[in-house]
Image (cartoon, helix red, strand yellow):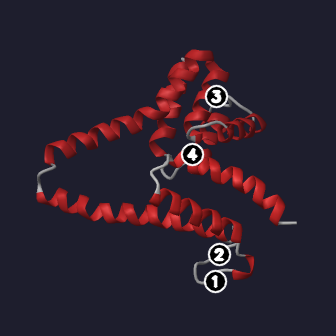
Amino acid sequence: MIYWELLLSFMQIGLFSIGGGYASMPLIQAQVVDKYHWLTMGEFADIITISQMTPGPVAINSATFVGMRIGGIAGAIVATLGCILPSCVIVLFLSFIYFKYRDVSVVQGVLGGLRPAGVALIGSAGLSILLMSFFGGNTESIYHLPFDKLDLIAIALFAICLILLRKTKKDPLLIMGGAGVIGMIAYPLLNR
């Protein structure tokens, strides 16, 4: 009975937690703390903290930890499967629809419109990270940049890495690691 409840509970969480890990926390709390009383609020806070510290999505990590706490290894497997099953079914359905109707002009038009939107979202995230790096996280708006807090070391490291990536065919991980080492040396020396 407990495994069935774990499965159904985390299937609901997996189905309705649209918007990422933080959006799923109230749903997890409603199921785990309020409805089934599997955890106290303190234990729930601990599990959310551990879920954020471990690699992977918060909802899946939480499902695994709660399942382990409630039903052992079998509970962890059942809860995790319940959390990922709705997404798997939706993706399989969408891929079936795509392969069936991929040659239809309407579908090609929709996909053609989504490609630039995807590139714009990735570019926007990259620009936000770049500005946070250059201004030390003090960017509220792109129109009001605090040039008095400009991080010249970050700009120099970015320029060096960009040149190395473009002019040489070195491994990007090697360049990132080198930038980390240079940053560990440069920041303490130059920010006295």
Q: Mark 3 or 4 closer to N-term?
A: 3
Q: CA distance from mark 1 to mark 2?
A: 7 Å
The disc at residue 65 is: 3
Residue furthest to the bottom:
143
Q: Circle 2 is placed at which residue position?
A: 140
The residue to which callout 4 is attached is: 174
Q: Nearer the viewer, mark 4 or mark 1?
A: 4
Secondary structure at numbered mark 1: loop
Q: Is residue 118 above or below residue 10?
A: below
Relative to residue 95, is residue 158 drawn left or right?
A: right
| Amino acid type shown at disc 2 | Glu
Gap between marks 4 and 1, in whole Å?
Answer: 34 Å
Mark 4–mark 1 CB contact (< 8 Å): no
Name the mark on residue 103: none
First reached walking from the N terminus: tag 2 or tag 4: 2
Residue at x 88%, y 66% (from the top left corner) = 192
Q: Check disc 2 and report its element: helix, strand or loop.
A: loop
Give me the residue at 68% from left, 39% from top. Answer: 53
